[in-house]
Image (cartoon, helix red, strand yellow):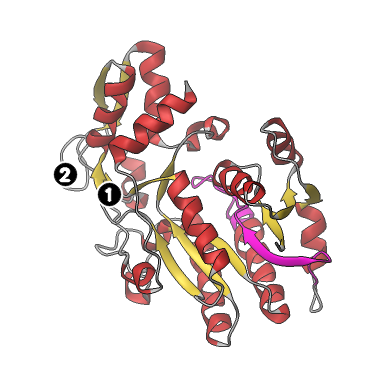
Amino acid sequence: MPTVLLTGGGGFVGAHVHRRLLDRGDDVVLVETPEGRDRARQAGLPATLVTAEDLRARLAGGAGTLPAGTGAVVHLGAETDTTLADETRYRRNNTEFSVALAEVCAAAGTPLVYASSAAVYGASPRCREVTEDEAPLNAYGQSKLDVDLRVRPLVAQGAPTVGLRFFNVYGPGEQHKGRMASMVTQLADQLRQDGRGRLFGASHGVGPGEQQRDFVHVDDVADVVLWFLDHTDRAGIYNCGTGQPRTFNDLAAAVVAHVGGEVEYVPFPPALTAHYQARTAADLGRLRGAGYAGTFRSLEEGVAQTLSEQG
């Protein structure tokens, strides 16, 4: 099996992909921060380590290189806090780093699967991998779209590169993300603490808790990542979600069924109105057209599995 260079392998999605790679016998070279490296070790995920700064230095300039022996790259490391005031962190850690990696991989003919985001769609009523649907509402989403815009011409020139636009990923192993953890984890923590889970009240023309997201379980996301790693001839940018939008009320009901308690609604923050995605739903036409036939578990099934594994 090839050596896979994995960035972010100590993170939430990264740890699940990391374990799957090891389980199937791949050699993994982990690119992480010291904190991410420690999380990977604590989770029992051994790997040769390259620091994020070491890789950044390797990629710098016009003659960047990958670590010797790299057969493929899975790039999941990113600045994932979507609310940062300092936009330079998105530009440096998301856009510039990812573009440099994509360009070096393209020049070397090395397969690359990287994480983009449904944040590129903003308030668009449709989420298709086309320019007219791409309208980010924040700097995080723009940083991800800027990478996709650079990757498209590389793919057109033959680069074996795949960008996956993750929708709302949830699952076990995300407690370290704090306020950026999924609402499954946040609601479960609230309900366990004081018996009350909190959702936004009415906003964007819908009732309390009726905002919608495409919630996708992390194991299903890992399935998609590994499928594209094994099908390097399917280059392009693809949505990675279930295609089935569900309300936050649906999600809360699934969490309450497992944890107990009740839901209360809090006023929607006015300052968030212009930057909030009230509905996302992955259009899976391109993904299915590429040949991916995997199924996605229901929200109820995924929430029950997540909370059972979290304890």
Q: Magenta stretch: residue 80 in it?
A: yes
Instruction: State left or right for residue 34 relative to residue 149.
Output: right
Between 168 and 86, which is closer to the camera in this rendering?
A: 168
Secondary structure beneath dot 1 equals loop
Q: Is residue 301 above or below residue 147?
A: above
Between 105 and 21, which is closer to the camera in this rendering?
A: 21
Q: Residue 215: x percent and y percent?
A: 34, 45
Circle 1 packing at 10 Å, graded few (<14), some (14-19), many (20+), is some
Q: Which residue is mark 1?
A: 278
Corner quadrant of residue 15: top right
Q: Magenta stretch: residue 89 in it?
A: yes
The reply to whether residue 139 is visible in this rendering is: no
Q: Is residue 181 above or below residue 159?
A: above
User: Considering the image in quadrants, where does the N terminus appear?
Assistant: bottom right
Q: Residue at x 51, y 79 (%)?
A: 152
For residue 206, which numbered disc appears in the image?
2
Q: Are marks 1 and 2 in contact (CB under 8 Å)?
A: yes
Secondary structure beneath dot 2 equals loop
Between 257 and 129, which is closer to the camera in this rendering?
A: 257
Q: Which residues are magenta?
A: 65-90
Q: Residue 142: x percent and y percent?
A: 48, 62
**Kind of residue at badge 2:** Val
Q: Residue 237: x percent and y percent?
A: 46, 71
